[in-house]
């Protein structure tokens, strides 16, 4: 995963995404300690800290790149805006991290955001702190452009070789001694990077009071017209109009300020990502500015997959699963 960060974030078609300014923090096949290091990874995902690769991940496999393939996924993509409804903040995070899978956990965002304050999260979503409180509902307008997917071979755990020191520790692991598993995880990690997707996403989070959110949702269920959709996405109905944000480069955000201004019925202009709708010339311009090196999808798999003995593999996974569930409950 040459010169890439571990990754993160956004949306139904945004399906997750994060800027990779903190490059070179993770290679495919490297492992990470899900129990202790995910707070740090959350910092890296947001591009806020500069960590060396070794401080975040562990080198456990010899030549993992030999068992990796790169797939072009742009050809399967269409230039369509996506509108996603989120009735609460948990749903917003679920959508925001939709492209990220972490084995043994259903909500990887809880671990990815452990070190984030509400202010930092609201900044990432482009809305004020107060919009992250209780009672508000959200609509996300997004355009996601995946470019390529880097993944391990399907039989990766059979053909890749662990470092000899790692292999020896697996062989010496005794079933029933939980500390052997937790000590291994602390030193060598619990999950490894199995695949990731590069591309970029542009998105806008809109905040609604329940009455107007429900009105919009019912309108969509009844085949809302484009004019009604535009109106319901305007300041006439929203409580907060989030900033149009790019996962990648600032160039997109500067372009948006100039090209996506819309006249409001309230007598002023506002910025709307939905203004891209039915404007192929604008789509072409924004695509040309989008970054192709942001991580918009990631899959972490458990390292116990490398254990040859089924009984030992099951034991390791059960111990890890118990600790992951406990960690999630305490977040």
Image (cartoon, helix red, strand yellow):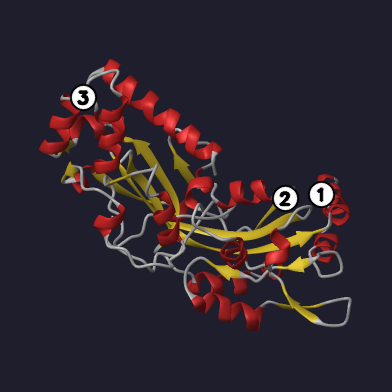
Q: Quadrant of the N terminus?
A: bottom left
Mark 2 or mark 1, which is nearer the start of the sequence?
2
Q: Are marks 1 and 2 in contact (CB under 8 Å)?
A: yes
Labels 3, 2: front one: 3
Mark 3–mark 2 distance (CA, rounded to whole Å): 47 Å
Looking at the picture, tell me which residue is in the foreground, 330 or 146: 330
Tell me residue 220's x, y (percent).
81, 50
Distance, label 3 to label 1, CA atoms, is 54 Å
Q: Residues within 10 Å of mark 2 (few under 14, many from 20)?
A: some
Q: Residues within 10 Å of mark 1 (few under 14, many from 20)?
A: some
The residue at 30%/38% (across/down) is 185
What is the CA distance from the residue labelled 1 to the residue labelled 2? 7 Å
Tell me which corner region of the image, top left, top right, bottom left or bottom right, holds residue 317.
top left
Q: Position of residue 76 (x, y in %)?
A: 48, 50
Left or right: 221 as drawn, with respect to 98: right
Residue 119: x, y in percent?
Answer: 61, 66
Left/right placement of residue 57 relative to residue 283 reads left
Q: Which mark is residue 217?
A: 1
Q: Is residue 277 visible?
A: no
Which residue is label 2 attached to? 85
């Amino acid at each position: 995963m040459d010169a890439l960060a571990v990754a993160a974030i956004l949306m139904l078609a945004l399906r997750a995404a994060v800027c990779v300014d903190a490059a070179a923090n993770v290679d495919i096949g490297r492992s990470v300690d899900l129990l202790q290091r995910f707070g740090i990874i959350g910092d890296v995902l947001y591009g806020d800290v500069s960590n060396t690769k070794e401080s975040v991940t562990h080198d456990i496999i010899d030549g993992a790149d030999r068992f990796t393939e790169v797939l072009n996924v742009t050809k399967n993509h269409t230039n369509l805006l996506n509108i996603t409804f989120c009735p609460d903040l948990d749903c917003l995070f679920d959508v925001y991290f939709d492209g990220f899978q972490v084995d043994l956990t259903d909500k990887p965002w809880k671990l990815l955001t452990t070190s984030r304050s509400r202010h930092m999260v609201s900044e990432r979503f482009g809305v004020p702190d107060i919009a992250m409180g209780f009672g508000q509902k959200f609509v996300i307008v997004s355009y996601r452009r995946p470019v390529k997917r880097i993944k391990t071979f399907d039989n990766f755990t059979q053909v890749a070789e662990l470092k000899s020191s790692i292999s020896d520790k697996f062989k010496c692991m005794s079933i029933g001694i939980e500390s052997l598993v937790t000590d291994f995880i602390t030193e060598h990690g619990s999950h490894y990077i199995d695949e990731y997707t590069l591309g970029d996403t542009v998105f806008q989070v809109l905040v609604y009071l329940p009455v107007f959110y429900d009105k919009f949702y019912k309108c969509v269920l009844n085949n809302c017209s484009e004019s009604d959709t535009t109106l319901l996405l305007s300041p006439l109905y929203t409580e907060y109009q989030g900033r149009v944000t790019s996962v990648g480069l600032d160039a997109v955000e500067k372009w948006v300020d100039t090209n996506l201004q819309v006249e409001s019925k309230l007598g002023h202009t506002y910025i709307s990502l939905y203004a891209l709708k039915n404007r192929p010339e604008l789509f072409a311009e924004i695509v040309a500015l989008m970054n192709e090196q942001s991580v918009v999808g990631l899959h972490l798999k458990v390292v116990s997959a490398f254990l040859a003995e089924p009984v030992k593999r099951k034991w390791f996974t059960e111990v890890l699963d118990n600790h992951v569930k406990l960690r999630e409950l305490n977040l």
